[in-house]
Amino acid sequence: MPDKAALLIGPLVHARSEWASVSKITSKLHEYPDGSRDDFLSKCRSGEYDDVFAMYRSNDSNRITGNFDSELISALPSSLKYICHNGAGYDNIDIAACTERGIQVSSTPIAVNNATADVAMFLVLGALRNVTHCFQAVRKGKWRGDFKLGHDPKDKTLGILGMGGIGSALAVRAKAFGMNIQYHNRHRLPEQQENGAKYVGFDELLETSDVLSLNLALSDSTRHIIGKKEFAEMKDGVVLVNTARGPLIDEEALVEALESRKVWTAGLDVFEKEPEIHEGLLRNENVVLLPHIGTATFETQRDMELLVLDNLRSAIKEGKLLTQVPEQKKDS
Ligand SMILES: *[C@@H]1O[C@H](CO)[C@@H](O)[C@H](O)[C@H]1NC(C)=O
Ligand SMILES: *[C@@H]1O[C@H](CO)[C@@H](O)[C@H](O)[C@H]1NC(C)=O
Ligand SMILES: *[C@@H]1O[C@H](CO)[C@@H](O)[C@H](O)[C@H]1NC(C)=O
């Protein structure tokens, strides 16, 4: 396969030998394990990567290059046709700019579903049991401390905003705990995919859920989809869980809703300005906090790396991605 090189930006940890074997179908494997945005841009502009046909990048590599915005995308070599991204979310890639340059982009849905749903269920239970105070008290030698009773998941209504792969995997778990499942998507799912969950409108979801879980992607239209107005529509004492993306929630409004007891407790794995966390969340014992560890398991990290490499191989051999981002699939 002459003249088709691949470029890896940032770390690849769990599938090194599979990456090495990509050399069988490429002319060269470039790696850019660390550096800076300026350095990377100057390497692109100097022609160092002019043979690169497909690229592996990850959310972790964003630390090195910064966002794949229109500036960076316009500096990429014209030979580059595929960006294989490791991550279910890809809000740090300007997809429209890629499409315009004829670059196809894949992400890693599916591989992340179970691990993220596990963390969502953990947060649902943790928030229902108000565990933060107990976690802290027992380690300080105070046993239960100033312990308060929690709630059972059984017979509570779980509202899932965004019934995709992760939302559906959460629904399976929550059903096993006796919860009733309802969901909202822009479009209703085919009945056999609903698995007994009830489809409701956005407002009805807010008004009737005891626990609300966010499992949708971040985009311009979903940024702050939960804010002051939406909290006002919710049941008093609602429990809110977010394992998707921080900016889906107006964090300032969440802090207010927690302080007014509109929101009983919350479980959060993602934050509006992570790794920074709003002071009002840090000091509130009614919030269960995790530092964005949804997919952080050995098994899932390896599955994600393998899926990126499957996309890379398919791009090189067949000129086709396996899990292309939906924004591009629409118009192809
Ligand atoms: C993705 O990268 C951003 C910084 O660009 C970071 O805040 C976020 O926690 C990362 N997400 C994951 C899942 O590692
Ligand atoms: C997720 O878990 C279910 C049930 O254990 C399993 O059938 C499915 O294959 C898993 N999905 C992935 C992508 O690993
Ligand atoms: C959670 O537990 C803490 C510590 O006992 C308590 O101050 C707080 O009121 C409890 N939260 C709820 C919503 O009951």
Image (spheres, helix red, strand yellow):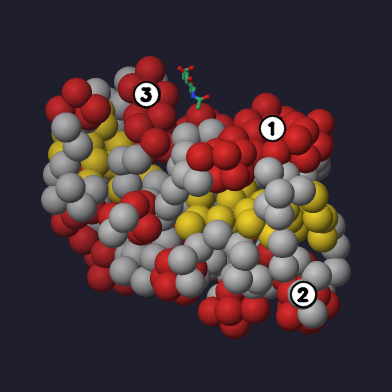
Mark 3 burial class by Cα count in 10 Å: few <14, some 14-19, many 20+: some
Snapshot quadrant of residue 146: top right
- Numbered disc in front, either 2 or 1: 2
In the rendered image, residue 132, in percent from the top left (x then y), is placed at 61, 44
| Towards the viewer: 179 or 73 | 73
Q: Residue at point 51% right, 40% down?
A: 318
Q: Residue at point 19% right, 23% down?
A: 192
- Numbered disc in front, either 1 or 3: 1
Gap between marks 2 and 1, in whole Å?
32 Å
Mark 1 burial class by Cα count in 10 Å: few <14, some 14-19, many 20+: some
Q: Which residue is mark 3?
A: 172
In the rendered image, residue 211, in percent from the top left (x then y), is placed at 34, 42
Which amino acid does the dot numbered 3 rest on?
Val
Confirm or reject: label 3 Cβ below 8 Å from ligand 2: yes
Helix, strand or loop under label 2: loop
> Farthest residue toward the top?
176
**Earlier along the polypeptide chain: callout 2 or callout 1?**
2
Q: Which residue is mark 2?
A: 47
Which amino acid does the dot numbered 2 rest on?
Gly
Q: How many marks?
A: 3
- Residue 126 visible at all: no
| Towards the viewer: 229 or 42 | 42
In the rendered image, residue 21, in percent from the top left (x then y), is placed at 77, 33
Q: From what the image shows, is residue 135 above or below residue 265?
A: above
Tag of residue 302: 1
Which amino acid does the dot numbered 1 rest on?
Arg
- Residue 293 visible at all: yes
In the rendered image, residue 255, in percent from the top left (x then y), is placed at 47, 67
- Numbered disc in front, either 2 or 3: 2
Q: Residue at point 80% right, 70% down?
A: 48
Q: From what the image shows, is residue 132 above or below residue 83?
A: above
